[in-house]
Image (cartoon, rainbow, N blue to C red):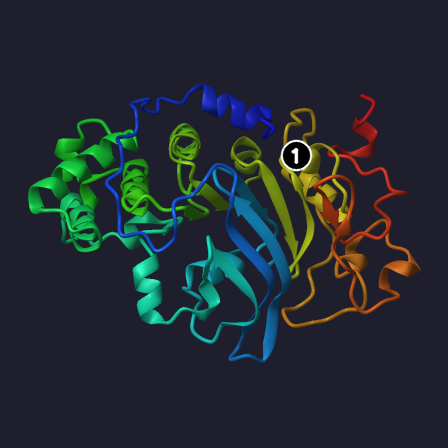
């Protein structure tokens, strides 16, 4: 079960999200087969991503799975490879970036082998996405209803009347009050929280197996953020939706996610159940992130700082890439070329070769016994 730290929990307590039931979804022309409870929806294996026209490797040997109804959070500093990993899954890597090795499979469909037409058949049906700035993904000259009914008519073959009825149902399902009015409004007439709900409605209109949310709540105030998190939780429960969530906010990840992948310098350095990762980290970088975030700790008055900087993209330091910033580094940490992502207990992995001898905490050492 995900951990609920004080800041996220208090925000959730003020949530005014609508609890109306999600309407039954029209059957889309899905690319992937119907999903069963807890099956693997997404399987990423040995993913490598290059930038700069193939000259620089920015993501190296990333492997993970996301099951039906599961939420997996990706955390780490800017430039750690989180967004490139998600954009590889969505097939929307920026120009000059490419998947150079590995696979990403969405319920039997190999994503890295898709051509443009294959991606067009997949996106909006089996694969949905929500990003940080919803206004950038909605056409300001078209009404919300026009933008929502178009994929319903094109992808699902609904009539104009049926598409309108379905669009209003979706707007109600994402917690918008007076959905019939919102249907006729333009994006510039809506608040940021309403726009994000519209974007979520658009993303789920094809009943996708996987929703990728990249910093989807970053620009929202605390109350609206909590409402959107409630909505995502309800969609997971009602639809068996798998969620891949990128966030810099550990409180959001703690509130929503079942598992956490910690990225550093293009690699996953820790992978495990959210509660264990947040309360008993198995990698020094995870511990450092938790101290910087001060998650669940209201006593500290001064934020901790992680000294130094991550290695440049494409740099390949020997051994642990975090070693030059790590207070626990030993000669063995940099003795080999690559440290594997090894087991650190049941359903946990870490790249720290000293994890068994270290006693890492989620709080500053002087506060552990306070």
Q: Position of residue 283 (x, y in %)?
A: 76, 47
Query: Is the C terminus in the top left, top right, bottom left or bottom right quadrant?
Result: top right
- Picture quarter containing residue 176? top left
124 vs 309, nearest the viewer: 124
Query: Is the N terminus in the top left, top right, bottom left or bottom right quadrant?
Result: top right
Q: Is residue 94 left or right of residue 347?
A: left
Q: Is residue 81 left or right of residue 213?
A: right
- Picture quarter containing residue 194? top left
78 vs 84, nearest the viewer: 84
Q: For mark 1, does the 10 Å Cα neighbourhood hold few (<14), some (14 to 19), or many (20 or more) residues? A: many
- The number of numbered discs placed on residues in the rendered structure image is 1
Q: Which residue is mark 1?
A: 294
Q: Residue at x 86, y 59 (%)?
A: 333
Q: Position of residue 301 (x, y in %)?
A: 67, 30
Q: Residue furthest left?
A: 161
Q: Is residue 369 left or right of residue 103?
A: right
Q: Label 1's element?
A: loop
Q: Position of residue 70 (x, y in %)?
A: 51, 38
Q: Is residue 20 left or right of residue 294?
A: left
- Picture quarter containing residue 223? top left
Q: Position of residue 227 (x, y in %)?
A: 39, 29
Q: Residue at x 85, y 37 (%)?
A: 359
Up-down: is 87 above or below 21?
Answer: below
């Amino acid at each position: 079960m995900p951990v609920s730290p004080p800041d996220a929990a208090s925000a959730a307590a003020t949530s005014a999200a609508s609890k109306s039931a999600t309407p039954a979804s029209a059957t889309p022309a899905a690319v992937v087969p119907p999903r069963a409870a807890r099956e693997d929806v997404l399987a990423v294996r040995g993913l490598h991503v290059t930038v700069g026209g193939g000259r620089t490797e920015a993501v190296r040997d990333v492997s993970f799975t996301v099951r039906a109804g599961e939420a997996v959070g990706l955390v780490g500093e800017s430039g750690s490879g989180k967004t490139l990993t998600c954009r590889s899954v969505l097939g929307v890597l920026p120009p000059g970036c490419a998947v150079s090795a590995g696979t990403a499979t969405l319920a039997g469909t190999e994503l890295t082998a898709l051509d443009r037409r294959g991606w067009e058949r997949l996106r909006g049906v089996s694969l949905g996405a929500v990003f940080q700035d919803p206004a950038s993904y909605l056409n300001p000259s078209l009404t919300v209803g026009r933008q929502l009914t178009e994929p319903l008519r094109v992808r699902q073959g609904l009539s104009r009347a049926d598409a309108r009825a379905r669009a209003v149902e979706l707007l109600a399902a994402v917690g918008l009050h007076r959905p019939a009015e919102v249907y006729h409004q333009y994006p510039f007439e809506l608040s940021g929280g309403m726009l994000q709900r519209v974007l979520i409605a658009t993303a789920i209109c094809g009943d996708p197996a996987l929703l990728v949310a990249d910093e989807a709540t970053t620009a929202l105030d605390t109350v609206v953020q909590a409402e959107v998190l409630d909505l995502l939780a309800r969609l997971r429960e009602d639809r068996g939706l798998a969620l891949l969530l990128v966030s810099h906010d550990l409180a959001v990840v703690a509130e929503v996610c079942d598992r956490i992948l910690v990225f550093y310098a293009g690699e996953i350095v820790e992978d495990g159940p959210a509660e264990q990762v947040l309360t008993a980290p198995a990698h020094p970088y995870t511990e450092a992130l938790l101290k910087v975030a001060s998650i669940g700790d209201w006593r500290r008055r001064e934020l901790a700082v992680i000294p130094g900087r991550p290695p440049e993209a494409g740099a390949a330091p020997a051994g642990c890439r975090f070693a030059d910033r790590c207070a626990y580094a030993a000669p063995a940490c940099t003795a080999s070329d690559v440290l594997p992502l090894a087991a650190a207990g049941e359903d946990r992995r870490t790249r720290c070769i000293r994890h068994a001898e270290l006693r890492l905490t989620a709080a500053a050492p002087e506060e552990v016994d306070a």
